[in-house]
Image (cartoon, rainbow, N blue to C red):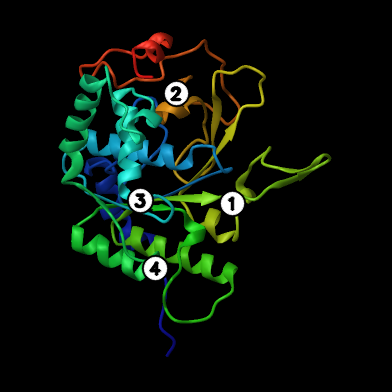
Amino acid sequence: MTAEHYTPAAGLFDAWADDVLHGKPPELWTPGAGFHSVELGPGLVVLVGGAPGAGKTALAMQWTVDALRADESLRVLVSNVEMAPRTLLDRQLARLAGVDASWIRKRMLAGQEYRVRAGLDELRRVSERLAFHTGPPVLADVARSVDAFGARFLVADYVQRFTIGNGDALDRRAELDGIMGHFRRFADAGLGVLAVSAVARQKGRTGSNYAGLGLASFRGSSELEYGADSCWTLSKDDAPDQWGAVNLTCQKNRHGETPSLLLTFDAARQTFTVANTGGGTAGAVTVPGRVSAVPDAFDLGGTPYNEADGEDGLF
C-alpha cells in the first residue's frame, strides 16, 4: 500500500489555534537602529545582493555586530571568503569609533585614541560570542565550525564562492542550487542565515550595468531567490548629489511587506544610516537632509564626527 503523505487540517487545528492565541512570537535579532523591517532570526534565510563596492559586506557586518550588541545570548559564525578576520574587525572598529577606516588600517590614531578605545571596548564585549570560519569555503566544514562554536547565526559572504564539498562534479548552477538547499536545511534545524550574494549586470540600451536590480539579479541560480525568506538588493542612488545615497530594497519577503529604505553609506567609516525610518512598499522613500554618519559615537562615550575632524593633527 502506498504511504499517505498528507496531514488533515483538523488534525493539527487545535494545537495550531492554541499556539496562535497563547504561543510566543518568533525570536528575532535586532540588526540596528532603523532596520526593524529586516528580520534576522532562527529558521530564516536572508539574502543580500549588490554590485561590487555597494557595501554588502559592510552592511552584513553592521547588522551582525549590532545584533550581538543587542542580544547577549546570541552567538555568530562569520564565514567570509574575501576578508581576513582582522580586516573585518578593523572596519567595525571604524564604524563604532566613528574614525576613518584608513586611519585604523594604517594605525594612525593620534588624537583619536579615546574614540578607538571606546570602540575596542564595545567589540571586546561581543568578542566571546563572535567567531570566524578560517577553513575552506566548503559548507560541510562551515557546518562543523557552526556546531563547534555553538553558533545560532551564520553569515556567509559571499554565496558564489562556496562549494558543497560532496565530491561530485557539479556545474555551477547545480552547485548554487545545492548551496541554497543546504542553507534551508540549516534554517530548518534552527540556524539563522544571512547570505551575501553577487548580482549580475543588467542589460540596457547603453550596455550592461548594475542599474535596475530586481529579484532575478542574484547571480547564478534562481534557487537563491526562491530559497530565501527575504531578498534585499543594495544599489547606489543615481541622484547627482554627493551624500552617499544607497537604496536598500526588499525584493521578496515571505512574511510581510517589501519595504524600500533610503540609506546613507559613509564608506570611510563603514557605516550605513537609515535616512527614512518609515516602512511602506518598495519605492516609497523620502530624500532627507544630510544625517549623522556615526550613530554610535554618542553611545560609546565619544563625540560625533564633524567635517573638521581631518584637521586634528592626524596627517
Q: Residues within 10 Å of mark 2 (few under 14, many from 20)?
A: many
Q: Which mark is residue 138?
A: 4
Instruction: Identify the residue at image location x=37%, y=13%.
Output: 309
If you read the primary sequence from the N terminus, does the residue marked by circle 3 or circle 2 appear first? 3
Spatial CA span between label 3 and label 1: 24 Å
CB under 8 Å between callouts 3 and 2? no
Given this view, does label 4 or label 3 mark the residue nearer the observer?
3
> Where's residue 265, x and y in %?
48, 27
Given this view, does label 4 or label 1 mark the residue nearer the observer?
4
If you read the primary sequence from the N terminus, does the residue marked by circle 4 or circle 1 appear first? 4
The answer to whether residue 49 is seen in the rendering is yes
Q: Amino acid at mark 2?
A: Val
When the figure is inspected, residue 310 is found, relative to residue 28, above or below; the finding is: above
Q: Residues within 10 Å of mark 3 (few under 14, many from 20)?
A: few
Spatial CA span between label 4 and label 2: 34 Å
When the figure is inspected, residue 127 is found, relative to residue 299, above or below; the finding is: below
In this image, 152 relative to 257: left or right?
A: left
If you read the primary sequence from the N terminus, does the residue marked by circle 1 or circle 2 appear first? 1
Asked which secondary structure carries label 4, the reply is: loop
**What residue is pinned by disc 1?**
218
**For the N terminus, which image quadrant?**
bottom left
Asked which secondary structure carries label 2, the reply is: strand
Front residue of 89 and 188: 89
